[in-house]
Structures are given as structure tokens and as C-alpha cells.
Image (cartoon, rainbow, N blue to C red):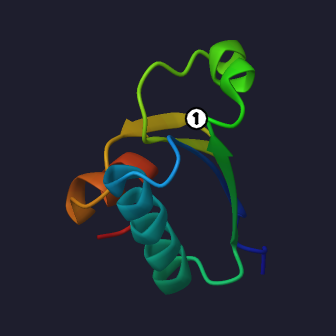
Amino acid sequence: MSKPPLFKFRLYVAGDGPHSTQARANLTALCRELLPERHEIEVVDVLRDPQRALTDGVMLTPLLVKLSPAPIRKITGSLSQREPLLQALGLPA
């Protein structure tokens, strides 16, 4: 039996603003529930590392990038709408 895929996410946030905090909490809760021990989350604070945001082409936060498994997907906002989020990430509802 093959091992389930590892989901790799990169979440761009702007400090501890309400939308950034909510996006971080929503992503963490979703991963704990649906992808236990099958996910990695990298958080990039664009206020602390603005050059990284420019290099990666990030113009709006919060921004979630699903790096793997393919295809790469980008989702903006606080990640509070569960059904569209699951659909965008390719996860079962």
C-alpha cells in the first residue's frame, strides 16, 4: 500500500493582523483534522522579510500556496470558508 502524499504549504502573512492570525489558525486546524502527520507549513511574515515577498511575487496577504502534491494552488484570504478551501486544495469535503 502506498504512503499518502505529504502536503506542503507556504502561508504568507503580514505580522499578527487579524486576517493573518485567522488564516494561520484555520490552516493549522484543517491540517490537524484532515492531514495529521501528513503536512508541513512554512509561515513567511512579509513584514519581517519583505524581500522574500517581492522575490516570490506576493502582493496580497494572507496568501496560502499549496506546494505539493501538484498542482500548485494559491488561495488568498483568512481561509475561513471551508468548502471552497477544501475544493481548492483538492481535499475531500
Tell me if residue 7 comes above or below residue 39 in the rendering: above
Which secondary structure, mark 1? loop
Look at 44% across and 52% down and name the residue there: 89
Look at 58% across and 35% down and name the residue there: 72
In-image side of 75 versus 46 (left or right): left
Image quadrant in which you'd find residue 90: bottom left
Residue 17 pos. (x, y %): 39, 51
Residue 25 pos. (x, y %): 44, 70
Question: What amino acid is at disc 1?
Answer: Ile
Tell me if residue 46 comes above or below residue 26 in the rendering: above
Task: Provide the residue designation for mark 1.
Answer: 72
Q: Quadrant of the C terminus?
A: bottom left
Q: Is residue 3 visible?
A: yes
Look at 73% across and 24% down and name the residue there: 52
Q: Is residue 91 visible?
A: no
Image quadrant in which you'd find residue 55: top right
Residue 61 pos. (x, y %): 43, 35
Residue 83 pos. (x, y %): 22, 61
